[in-house]
Image (spheres, grey):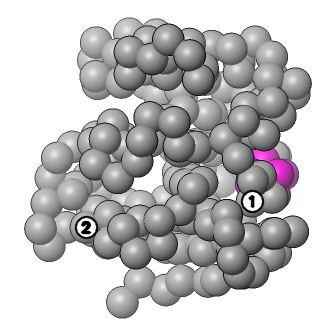
Amino acid sequence: MVRRITLGNGDPKRLFIGGLHGDEWRYTSSILESLDAPGTGTLIIIPKLTDRAYISTLDDRYYDYGSYGRDVIAAIVEIKPEIYLELHSYHDFDGLTDPGRIHKAGVPAYIELDDGVLIGSISPILRRTCFSMYDLCLSFEIPAGNRKSQRLARELLEFTKDCVSRDEFLDFLLDRYPDQGLRAIENYKRFYGIEKI
């Protein structure tokens, strides 16, 4: 059974997950475990989904029967979060931020906010299966073992856990990181064929 931490109660519901594959949990779990209850609503945290072998969340096999991605889907179906966030760690900055990633991996490149902290959308497999195109679903990536980026990631998660809507997060993103926010939104709209969000 995957360990969950439930903080607060009521709506909106938020689900934050770390340790989605490999040893990522070593760099992300403590950040997730340090969060307090949101000002309103519920925050459910899964600090370590698994430490089994790395399979990309972009790979259908990640969500196959018996695979750990099934636990992600089961949690989403049960909780029905309005805000969903994955916290990953990385070793390959260039691969994740490569403008050609859309052609190589089938998804847009991550965008650096600051201090190596990257923002992007979650796997389109999961998004199309469990969420509408208008739900707030985020993926943050931090460089493995970088304390400065871990501090910034915690700050971003602290804000996100208190958001009550997608629009509130987008306003924050565009205010604090206007260029990066606009690029992230444009990537998302192009990828999913949405004119307006």
| Residue type marked 1 | Lys
Q: Is residue 149 above or below residue 93?
A: below
- The image quadrant where one finds the N terminus is bottom left
Q: Using the rendered view, name the quadrant where residue 168 is placed.
A: top right
Q: What residue is disc 1 on? A: 161
Report how far apart the C-alphas of labels 2 and 1 lie in the structure. 24 Å
Q: Is residue 176 above or below residue 18?
A: above
- Residue at point 77%, 52% (across, down): 163
Mark 1 nearby-residue class (10 Å; few <14, some 14–19, many ≥20)? many
- Disc nearer the start of the sequence (2/1): 2
Residue 146 visible in image: yes
Residue 115 visible in image: no
Could you say which is closer to the camera, residue 95 or residue 132? 132
Q: Using the rendered view, name the quadrant where residue 13 is placed.
A: bottom right
- Residue at point 15%, 52% (across, down): 61
Q: What residue is disc 2 on? A: 70
Q: Which residues are magenta?
A: 154-160
The percent position of residue 165, horizontal first and vertical second, equals 70, 47
- Residue at point 75%, 53% (across, down): 164
Label 1 residue SS? helix
